[in-house]
Image: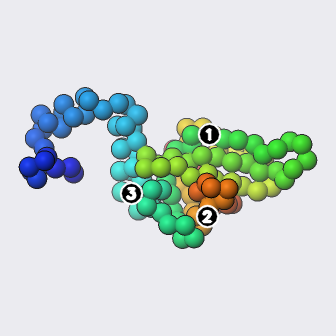
Amino acid sequence: MTTTPQGRRPTLLQRFFGRLARSNDEIVAEQLAQAAVASGAHSIASAQVRDRVVLKGDIGSVTIGPRDGGPKRLEAELNDGTGSVALVWMGRRTIPGIEVGRRVVVRGTLTIFSGRRVVFNPRYELLP
Protein backbone atom coordinates (compact mmCIF):
# COMPACT_ATOMS: atom_id res chain seq x y z
CA MET A 1 0.00 0.00 0.00
CA THR A 2 1.23 3.51 -0.75
CA THR A 3 1.68 6.19 1.83
CA THR A 4 0.94 9.91 1.87
CA PRO A 5 3.80 12.45 1.85
CA GLN A 6 3.43 12.59 5.65
CA GLY A 7 4.18 8.83 5.84
CA ARG A 8 0.60 7.81 6.76
CA ARG A 9 -1.65 5.37 4.96
CA PRO A 10 -4.15 7.16 2.71
CA THR A 11 -7.75 7.39 3.92
CA LEU A 12 -10.60 5.69 2.10
CA LEU A 13 -11.60 9.02 0.56
CA GLN A 14 -8.02 9.69 -0.64
CA ARG A 15 -7.83 6.22 -2.22
CA PHE A 16 -11.20 6.76 -3.92
CA PHE A 17 -10.22 10.11 -5.47
CA GLY A 18 -6.74 8.80 -6.33
CA ARG A 19 -8.37 5.97 -8.22
CA LEU A 20 -10.61 8.39 -10.12
CA ALA A 21 -7.55 10.35 -11.27
CA ARG A 22 -5.92 7.27 -12.85
CA SER A 23 -6.70 5.88 -16.29
CA ASN A 24 -8.44 2.55 -16.73
CA ASP A 25 -5.24 1.14 -18.28
CA GLU A 26 -3.27 2.05 -15.13
CA ILE A 27 -5.85 0.38 -12.91
CA VAL A 28 -5.91 -2.79 -15.04
CA ALA A 29 -2.09 -2.92 -15.10
CA GLU A 30 -1.95 -2.59 -11.30
CA GLN A 31 -4.52 -5.36 -10.81
CA LEU A 32 -2.70 -7.62 -13.28
CA ALA A 33 0.64 -7.03 -11.52
CA GLN A 34 -0.90 -7.75 -8.09
CA ALA A 35 -2.51 -10.97 -9.36
CA ALA A 36 0.77 -12.16 -10.90
CA VAL A 37 2.81 -11.56 -7.75
CA ALA A 38 0.08 -13.02 -5.50
CA SER A 39 0.21 -16.27 -7.52
CA GLY A 40 3.92 -16.62 -6.84
CA ALA A 41 5.12 -15.54 -10.30
CA HIS A 42 8.01 -13.16 -10.86
CA SER A 43 7.16 -9.66 -12.04
CA ILE A 44 8.54 -8.99 -15.51
CA ALA A 45 10.08 -5.72 -14.37
CA SER A 46 12.11 -7.41 -11.62
CA ALA A 47 13.02 -10.61 -13.51
CA GLN A 48 16.77 -10.96 -14.11
CA VAL A 49 18.31 -12.01 -17.41
CA ARG A 50 19.61 -15.63 -17.46
CA ASP A 51 17.31 -16.60 -14.58
CA ARG A 52 14.68 -19.32 -14.77
CA VAL A 53 11.43 -17.42 -14.37
CA VAL A 54 7.75 -18.07 -13.87
CA LEU A 55 5.69 -15.26 -15.41
CA LYS A 56 1.94 -14.73 -15.40
CA GLY A 57 0.14 -12.22 -17.57
CA ASP A 58 -2.00 -11.49 -20.61
CA ILE A 59 -0.99 -11.96 -24.23
CA GLY A 60 -1.08 -8.58 -25.97
CA SER A 61 -0.09 -9.57 -29.49
CA VAL A 62 0.68 -12.67 -31.53
CA THR A 63 2.94 -12.64 -34.60
CA ILE A 64 3.74 -15.48 -36.99
CA GLY A 65 7.35 -15.69 -38.21
CA PRO A 66 8.39 -15.19 -41.83
CA ARG A 67 6.55 -17.08 -44.54
CA ASP A 68 9.33 -16.58 -47.11
CA GLY A 69 11.42 -19.61 -46.24
CA GLY A 70 12.95 -18.33 -43.01
CA PRO A 71 12.74 -20.35 -39.82
CA LYS A 72 9.18 -20.81 -38.59
CA ARG A 73 8.36 -19.14 -35.28
CA LEU A 74 5.42 -17.94 -33.26
CA GLU A 75 5.90 -14.81 -31.15
CA ALA A 76 3.60 -13.51 -28.42
CA GLU A 77 4.01 -10.43 -26.25
CA LEU A 78 3.28 -11.14 -22.56
CA ASN A 79 2.33 -8.24 -20.27
CA ASP A 80 1.95 -8.54 -16.49
CA GLY A 81 1.27 -4.89 -15.64
CA THR A 82 4.90 -4.18 -14.73
CA GLY A 83 6.39 -4.73 -18.17
CA SER A 84 6.37 -7.01 -21.17
CA VAL A 85 8.46 -9.84 -22.57
CA ALA A 86 8.47 -11.61 -25.93
CA LEU A 87 7.65 -15.32 -25.93
CA VAL A 88 9.10 -17.13 -28.97
CA TRP A 89 8.33 -20.71 -29.97
CA MET A 90 10.72 -21.85 -32.69
CA GLY A 91 9.45 -24.23 -35.37
CA ARG A 92 5.80 -23.37 -34.72
CA ARG A 93 3.31 -21.25 -36.65
CA THR A 94 0.36 -21.80 -34.30
CA ILE A 95 -0.33 -23.06 -30.80
CA PRO A 96 -3.97 -23.65 -29.89
CA GLY A 97 -5.01 -21.24 -27.14
CA ILE A 98 -2.15 -18.77 -27.62
CA GLU A 99 -4.21 -15.77 -28.68
CA VAL A 100 -4.58 -12.09 -27.85
CA GLY A 101 -6.21 -11.48 -24.47
CA ARG A 102 -5.48 -14.96 -23.11
CA ARG A 103 -4.02 -15.19 -19.60
CA VAL A 104 -1.09 -17.61 -19.32
CA VAL A 105 1.63 -18.75 -16.95
CA VAL A 106 4.99 -19.38 -18.66
CA ARG A 107 8.22 -20.92 -17.42
CA GLY A 108 11.60 -20.54 -19.04
CA THR A 109 14.91 -18.71 -19.10
CA LEU A 110 14.80 -14.95 -19.63
CA THR A 111 17.30 -13.73 -22.23
CA ILE A 112 18.09 -10.61 -24.23
CA PHE A 113 17.92 -11.00 -27.99
CA SER A 114 18.18 -8.08 -30.43
CA GLY A 115 17.72 -5.69 -27.52
CA ARG A 116 14.45 -7.30 -26.35
CA ARG A 117 13.65 -9.40 -23.29
CA VAL A 118 12.73 -12.85 -24.65
CA VAL A 119 11.85 -16.31 -23.35
CA PHE A 120 12.49 -18.92 -26.06
CA ASN A 121 10.30 -22.03 -26.22
CA PRO A 122 8.66 -21.47 -22.82
CA ARG A 123 6.52 -24.07 -21.13
CA TYR A 124 3.07 -22.60 -20.82
CA GLU A 125 -0.21 -23.11 -19.02
CA LEU A 126 -3.42 -21.57 -20.37
CA LEU A 127 -5.58 -20.00 -17.68
CA PRO A 128 -9.35 -19.46 -17.84
Above-or-below relation of 38 to 81: below
Give the residue at mark 3: 37
Query: In the current view of this chain or complex, which residue is farthest to the right?
Result: 69
Residue 25, quarter of the rendered image: top left
Counting from the top left corner in percent of width and height, residue 60 is at 57, 40
Spatial CA distance of label 3 from label 2 is 21 Å
Label of residue 61 in the image: 1
Counting from the top left corner in percent of width and height, residue 27 is at 34, 37
Indicate left or right for 40 with 94 as reference.
Answer: left
Q: Amino acid at mark 1?
A: Ser
Q: Amino acid at mark 2?
A: Thr
Q: Amino acid at mark 3?
A: Val
Give the residue at mark 2: 111
Residue at position x 21%, y 49% from top?
2
Q: Secondary structure at mark 3?
A: helix
Indicate left or right for 119 with 95 as reference.
Answer: left
Residue at position x 64%, y 46% from top?
76
Spatial CA distance of label 1 from label 3 is 22 Å
